């Protein structure tokens, strides 16, 4: 029996929220060349939504890059963060906004922020599509948050379960055939 996918946040709501967040970041970002850095693979669709909705007046100077870190094995955090791919762009003196798909334990983001602070950006902020209402291993700042959700296992819009469901254009709760969520 297949897992059940229960829609949680529809695409239109994600796009509307991304547009509002992109506008807020563009207004608050003092730089003419802000840099968005997405965490692969999950944040890629959200980062691209932000880029699509960035105000036209600031699009010429907007840059983006990606970093790839690994901290999960299946559905569980491994407790260790491994840098797989670093940014290509020099962060020194730049207004950097880290774009994350979901903040839950805070472990990955804590590691990435420490890594980025060592690269001497002018400013460093965090934008996350989702933030779980959970106790975190590491409290991390989330300057721009799309949606706060309960402690649910979600997929879609970049979020996956063992590599699948990432391409859904909405966010859904994944329920296993026994009625439970993945752990």
Image (spheres, rainbow, N blue to C red):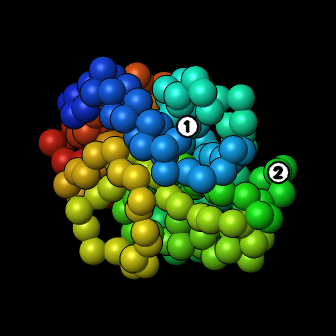
Q: Is mark 1 on a helix, strand or loop?
A: helix
Q: Relative to 104, is 37 above or below?
A: above
Q: Give the Cα separation between the discs numbered 2 and 1.
A: 16 Å
Quadrant where the C terminus is found in the figure: bottom left
Q: Relative to 53, is 67 above or below?
A: below
The residue identified by callout 2 is 89
| Relative side of 150 to 35, left or right | left
Residue in view at x 37 percent, y 26 percent: 15
Q: Earlier in the sequence, mark 2 or mark 1?
A: 1
| Relative side of 170 to 71, left or right | left
| Relative side of 104 to 125, left or right | left
Residue in view at x 25 percent, y 39 percent: 173
Check the image and name the residue furthest to the left. 179
Residue in view at x 68 percent, y 37 percent: 62
Q: In the rendering, at what x and y percent does residue 39 appear?
A: 60, 50
Q: Which residue is nearer to you in this view: 35 or 77?
A: 35
Mark 2 surroundings: few (<14), some (14-19) or many (≥20) residues within 10 A: few
Q: How many labels does the image show?
A: 2
Q: In the rendering, at what x and y percent does residue 126 appear?
A: 50, 58
Label placed on residue 130: none
Q: Is mark 2 on a helix, strand or loop?
A: loop
Residue in view at x 43 percent, y 78 percent: 138
Label placed on residue 47: 1
Quadrant where the N terminus is found in the figure: top left
Q: In the rendering, at what x and y percent does residue 64 appear?
A: 69, 41
Q: In the rendering, at what x and y percent does residue 27 appear?
A: 48, 44
Q: Does residue 86 appear in the picture of this structure?
A: no
Residue 12 figure quarter: top left
| Relative side of 14 to 30, left or right | left
Q: Does residue 155 appear in the picture of this structure?
A: yes
């Amino acid at each position: 029996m297949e897992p059940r996918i229960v829609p949680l946040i529809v695409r239109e709501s994600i796009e509307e929220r991304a547009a509002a967040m992109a506008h807020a970041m563009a207004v608050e970002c003092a730089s003419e060349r802000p840099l968005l850095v997405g965490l692969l693979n999950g944040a890629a669709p959200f980062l691209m939504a932000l880029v699509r909705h960035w105000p036209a007046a600031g699009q010429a100077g907007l840059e983006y890059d990606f970093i790839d870190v690994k901290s999960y094995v299946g559905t569980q955090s491994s407790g260790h963060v491994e840098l797989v791919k670093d940014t290509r762009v020099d962060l020194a003196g730049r207004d950097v906004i880290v774009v994350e798909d979901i903040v839950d334990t805070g472990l990955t983001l804590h590691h990435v922020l420490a890594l980025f602070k060592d690269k001497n950006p002018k400013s460093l902020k965090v934008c996350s599509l989702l933030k779980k209402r959970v106790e975190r291993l590491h409290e991390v700042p989330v300057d721009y948050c799309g949606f706060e959700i309960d402690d649910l296992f979600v997929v879609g819009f970049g979020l996956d379960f063992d590599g699948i469901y990432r391409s859904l254009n909405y966010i859904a709760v994944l329920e296993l055939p026994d009625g439970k969520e993945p752990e």
